[in-house]
Amino acid sequence: MDRWMDVCMYLIVMLLFMYGGLSSVCGLSSEQAALLAFKQQLTVLNQNGGGSVLATWSDMSSSPCSWTGVSCNNLGQVIQLCLNQTGISGTIAPELGLLSQLQHLDLSENNLNGTIPAALANLTNLQHLNLSGNGLNGTIPIELGSLLNLQYLDVNSNYLLSGSPVPVELGNLVHIQYLDLSTNSLSGHIPAIFTMTQLQHFDISGNYLTGPISPLFATLSNLVFLNLSNNSLSGSLPAEIWGMTQLVELDVGDNLLTGTLPKEVGNLKNLQGFFFGNSRLTGPIPMEISLCTNLVRLDLGGNSFSGTIPDAFANMKSLVTLNLPSLQVNGTIPPSLGNCTNLQNLVLDNNHLEGPIPLEIGKLLNLTVLSISSNFLSGSIPVELCSCIHLTTLNLGSNMLTGEIPNQIGELINLDYLVLSHNNITGQIPSGICNIPPELAQLTNLTTLDLSSNSLTGSIPPQFGESHKLQGLNLAYNKLTGEIPAELGDIVSLVQLNLTGNCLSGLIPYQLGNLLMYLDLSENQLSGDFPESLCNLEDLVFFNISSNEISGTIPNTGVCRTFSVLSFASNNGLCDLATPCRKQASSPMGIEQRRISGGGGGVQRSIKFEEFLVGCCFVSRSNCCQISRRIYLFQALACIRPEF
């Protein structure tokens, strides 16, 4: 019986294509047959351990109006098919074109592939078509230009139109209000959409479009959202754009646009989002932009603006995101930014800003991201920043900051990313000592902590072991002393640990976590036997304990077999299994013991030529090895050892 029904359904579909007036055969309506033909093209995942989302579609005797995702009008005709985010995969069957009364078709956010059927152009009543977030390829059928009732078309995030332009026939969609062609592989120029006089939302970002931006966009008087970003558009933005006072969001960033930002930008009083980043703009940032008092998000980063950050930005009280990285602006950070009390994201990295961090930044109580690295900021870290208790990201790295890390930083309990590296943080205590405040260890949400390349002294707080979310800990190139706390082994998520270039002593803790991928303990004063447990760190891809005082035998097991000799170099008494450790040995061929600078306060290290040869043979299995310039440069004359 089931096989007969399958054959019957197949014949029905064929007949329906040949004779559109045929209403029913074998007890199936034309709409049932079309939907079941579509189902046959699909693979359907079970939903949350339950049955298939299309399980109800198997009832041949029922009306399709009761099927999942199907809605009908009072006459029992299918007017809506909504299967978005249902996990279906396969192709879109052309038989869907037989649903003559369909008004709404949404198959978005699934795993559909193949092409968009031209037969969808038969859906002359269609108002809403959403095929976004799939894996569709090929071109947009020119036949879709005949869907004159279409108001909403979204095909974003597919693989459409590789090497082909957008069909000009889409310009016939005179009632379209929402058009999203973004994140595909579209090429050519921006399509001629200027007959779409009702268009409110146009997004063609994330493609390969070239050429200039047409001034005819200004004729689209209903357009409130325009996104042309992430293409290769060139030339300058037409002056007519600054007359589009109805615009709420304008994104033309990540293109090859040139020119300046004119003062007429202040005409866009309704603008809430303005994105012009990563282009080739020059000249000053016009103060008139502050007239856009409804701005919520402003991104001008990655251009070549000159001059200073306008003080008048303080007038933009609605501002939530201010993104001005990688410009060439100079001067100071305007203290008036403290008046933008809605600000949540302030990013000013990689500029030429100087002077102190304004105390007024501490008034931004909604701030979650403060990133002002790679400038020339000086002075100490204001304790007022610790009032911004919602901060999740604080990046002050690569400046000229001095003074101590405020103890109150422990109050920033939401921090997950803290970078103070490459400054000159030493503290103001007369002895010149600036300990790492144990309050940092209270930041239990931290995933990244980078205090490297400062002048911090004291010991590493064992309380860091309570930072169970910490993935990266970088304290390299300071003046830290004492032992490596065994409690660091309690950080179960730790992936990167960098303590190189300090004055740490004692043993390497065997408790170090099993998730470590990067471990650098070099250029310290660590001693004791090589911990065999390090060879069991299966995920370790970078390892360096060179320039210490570690002794004992390097096991020929696990990851220890894979690392270069440079990972072990300059450790007196460290040897491998094939070469017995010797307390005293003379250098072969009269070559004297060499001394090198080991960092971390200029501590001197020593290495014997024969010790280097042993390590070289152990790791590289070669007959001739060369040590890097970082230690000293010469070539081994004889390094012979059987393969293992």
Image (cartoon, rainbow, N blue to C red):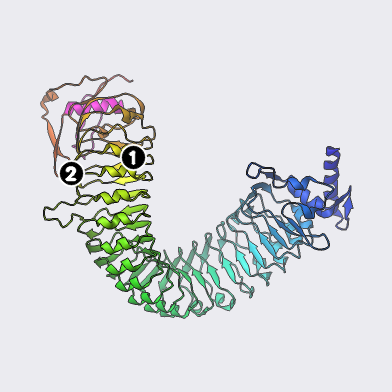
Residue type (three-letter) at the residue carrying disc 2 = Gly
Q: Mark 2 points at which residue?
A: 600
Residue at (61, 74) in percent of width and height: 194
**Residue 622 seen in render:** no
**What is the magenta range?**
609-638
Residue 455 versus residue 592 in the image, above or below? below
For residue 385: magenta? no
Q: In which quarter of the image is the N terminus?
A: top right
Residue type (three-letter) at the residue carrying disc 1 = Tyr
Q: How far apart are marks 1 and 2 (CA)?
A: 20 Å
Q: Position of residue 397 (x, y in %)?
A: 28, 56
Residue at (39, 41) in percent of width and height: 493
Could you say whether the residue bearing mark 2 is in a helix, strand or loop? loop
Residue 555 versus residue 97 in the image, above or below? above
Q: Residue 518 carries which label?
A: 1
Q: Which quadrant holds residue 343?
A: bottom left
